[in-house]
Amino acid sequence: MRPQVPANPVYLILGGARSGKSGHAEMLARAEGNDLHYVATAQALDPEMETRIAHHRAARGPDWQTHEAPIALVECLGQLSSRPRPVVVVDCLTLWVTNLLLADHDIEAAGAQLADFTAKCRFPLFVVANEVGLGIVPDNALARRFRDEAGRLNQQLAAAASSVIFMTAGLPIQVKSTS
Amino acid sequence: MRPQVPANPVYLILGGARSGKSGHAEMLARAEGNDLHYVATAQALDPEMETRIAHHRAARGPDWQTHEAPIALVECLGQLSSRPRPVVVVDCLTLWVTNLLLADHDIEAAGAQLADFTAKCRFPLFVVANEVGLGIVPDNALARRFRDEAGRLNQQLAAAASSVIFMTAGLPIQVKSTS
Amino acid sequence: MRPQVPANPVYLILGGARSGKSGHAEMLARAEGNDLHYVATAQALDPEMETRIAHHRAARGPDWQTHEAPIALVECLGQLSSRPRPVVVVDCLTLWVTNLLLADHDIEAAGAQLADFTAKCRFPLFVVANEVGLGIVPDNALARRFRDEAGRLNQQLAAAASSVIFMTAGLPIQVKSTS
């Protein structure tokens, strides 16, 4: 008799600004369970970001537990691993890269650690990330480096994920699927 | 006996600059009928825009009636509704957002009105829109707000449309299809 | 008896910065033969570009012959035609547009010539190009012109190619396929 294997999807959800990434991640997450965790990498450093964060939190509703992990993302996911069956949205990878870059952390090492966690992850995980490389080459060197690091990390996570989705105008294009 | 329902496609055609959006919209429109209407949201405010507009108009050919609707887009579509079987291209949604933003109109209300019209539209309609959210975060706040509004409107229209296409290098990727 | 026709794929591989375009082109090329040629359009005009070029060259490994063709791309491809069965990667079209633009060449004529060569190409050819039109409209006129020219050339090449791929996060989305 074939044992019933619990579904354990690990998604990377890519897209541009206002493409519906977060909403899609939350919808997919809700279908996986009730112990809902939202890991935010955003830091409310200015009023504009505060407004965005408050807007997102209100839109999610009260049945989510929010965790802030601007830098210590892998540690936060590790702590959630101790729960019986958490369902986790990480939003988003690209702000994490920004935070690591500004704090002068080793992005390649951090990315490898996250990809490693993701590949072995034992709970449903939905990672949101921005695709930022489809405009013209930025003027300044820091923006170019950020663009390179964000793109590289997206590639690492996409390789580790079981499913990859590219969002446009609120609609998903399935790019990778292992099922 | 099942009545013959007239085909009534409502398309949102997304893409970047020079991705072939307008050409694809015009090709799809021609296949739907002969009473061809082109609703332009562009305003020739400077020589560069004048050149672009003249170039587009020449490329379309003489069998299109051109209407200018930089702000009053829904009203213009409403007037076209009185014709027996118009076929309409709107080009483009993103310039409309720019115009609304610069004229300090309520973009959310205008967008809701347009989405409502679109969902009930009784003639073939092909709406062209730019995807503008796939580069790095813009430096200035107005550009960020524009990007947010344009993305939100794309999501609203995509939800109301029967088909959504993402263009790249002149080629369509079908993102939504109800047929 | 039907003669065995040698496979002769001509690919356009589109994508953003760090989307895995070059790696995917190289992987597809290796599957086609051993006489591997890498036609680089990059010019090492500053230390940042030198580092990028050296990084790419090291990642490819020693079994590629590298040719530099910042401007004379069609001529370079013409010379490779004299070999029995070359397999060629061009990386990338978008830097070629930049070079033509800065040297004040006729981009439309050069693009038409390349598209013509591509459509008749008798060896496996993998052309890498950036999609640069999916961010907000650039501030300065030169960047807007570059974006237009790059987009137009992508359309020409996509029409001439037998396959077109759009890369995101290292993963391919097949946009055109003639097989």
Image (cartoon, coloured by chain):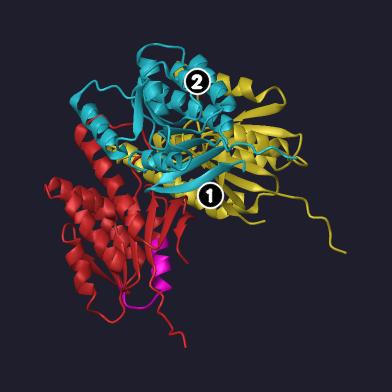
Chain colours: A yellow, B cyan, C red
Is residue A162 something that shows in the picture?
Answer: yes
Residue wearing tag 2: B82
Left or right, A152 with reference to C112: right
Q: What element carries label 1?
A: helix
Q: Which chain carries label 1?
A: A
Residue that appears at 55% across and 33% down = B161
**Image location of residue A86, percent across then percent down:** 72, 39
Residue wearing tag 1: A157
Residue that appears at 56% across and 20% down = A55
Vertical position of residue A126 compared to residue A65: above or below: below
Q: What residue type is labelled 1?
A: Leu
Highlighted range, magenta: C24-36
Is residue A109 something that shows in the picture?
Answer: no
Left or right, C146 with reference to C170: left
Towards the viewer: C8 or C141: C8
Q: Which amino acid does label 2 sit on?
A: Ser
Left or right, A122 with reference to A161: right
Towards the viewer: B16 or A72: B16
Q: Of tags 2 and 1, which is closer to the observer?
A: 2
